[in-house]
């Protein structure tokens, strides 16, 4: 029998739990698994590395208009055009 | 990358009707059950390791070799990284026992460590094998 610790420190439990976002207040935008197959810090590791506020909530990101505006995305340097 | 990320977000709209909650992906309606997880783990284990375990636990393989390989596959060695992950040793004390400076992992000890690679070179030296073959003939 396997325990919760897998090869990369990710086990069967963590892989099978997702966050169902309704108001987004108690979900971490980068760190919680809530959209897509993995947390955004894994899906977009480069963006996560550059993000200034790594523990911002989903609600705060949407309040700042992450879908369209630039204000929500605060980086530690300017992004390259391809980033 | 930011563009792709935004595309993911474009389908999402937040609602103030209730708060976020955790969902068990395998059974979203009933949630986590011990029997469901038991089924998941036992069926996966059979799929992924049957072929391998037939090889490992073969009657012609000495028991100590089987145990060693089994522990290798499941990462059950007291390497420094495992000891650290289990809270046995403090951070910053995870370097290879051979003193090469890298973090001591199973992958490192058995595959990439320059020190133990040399040791393998001695053990599996073709000349040595030739000598053994001749002895047994």
Image: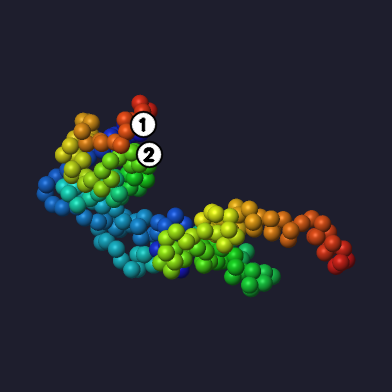
Q: Quadrant of the C terminus of chain B?
A: bottom right
Q: Are marks 1 and 2 in contact (CB under 8 Å)?
A: yes
Position of A30 with respect to B14 (left or right) is: right
Q: Residue at x 30, y 40 (%)?
A: A51
- Residue identifier under label 2: A46
Q: CA distance from mark 1 to mark 2?
A: 8 Å
For mark 2, give the secondary structure. helix
Viewer-side residue, A40 vs B34: A40
| Rendering quarter of residue B54 | bottom right
| Rendering quarter of residue B66 | bottom right
- Residue A2 seen in this snapshot: no
Mark found first going from the N terminus, 1 or 2:
2
| Rendering quarter of residue A40 | top left
For mark 1, give the secondary structure. loop
Viewer-side residue, A34 vs A28: A28
Label drawn at residue A20 = none
Q: Sort mark 2 into few (<14), some (14-19) or many (20+) by Cα contacts within 10 Å.
A: few
Chain identity of mark 1: A
- Residue identifier under label 1: A83
């Amino acid at each position: 029998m396997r325990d919760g610790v897998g090869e990369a420190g990710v086990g069967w439990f963590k892989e099978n739990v997702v966050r169902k976002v309704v108001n987004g207040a108690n979900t971490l935008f980068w760190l919680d698994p809530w959209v897509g197959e993995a947390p955004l810090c894994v899906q977009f590791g480069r963006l996560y590395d550059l993000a200034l506020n790594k523990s911002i909530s989903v609600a705060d990101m949407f309040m700042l208009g992450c879908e369209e505006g630039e204000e929500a995305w605060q980086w530690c340097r300017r992004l390259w055009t391809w980033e | 990358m930011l563009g792709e990320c935004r595309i993911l977000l474009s389908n999402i709209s937040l609602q103030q009707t209730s708060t976020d909650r955790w969902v068990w992906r395998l059974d979203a309606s009933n949630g986590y059950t011990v029997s469901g997880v038991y089924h998941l783990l036992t069926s996966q284990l059979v799929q992924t390791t049957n072929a391998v375990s037939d090889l490992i636990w073969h009657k012609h393989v000495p028991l100590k070799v089987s145990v060693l390989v089994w522990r290798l596959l499941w990462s059950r060695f007291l390497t420094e990284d495992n000891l650290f992950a289990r809270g046995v040793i403090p951070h910053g004390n995870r370097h290879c026992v051979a003193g090469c400076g890298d973090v001591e992992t199973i992958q490192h000890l058995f595959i990439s460590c320059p020190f133990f690679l040399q040791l393998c070179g001695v053990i599996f030296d073709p000349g040595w094998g030739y000598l053994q073959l001749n002895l047994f003939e």
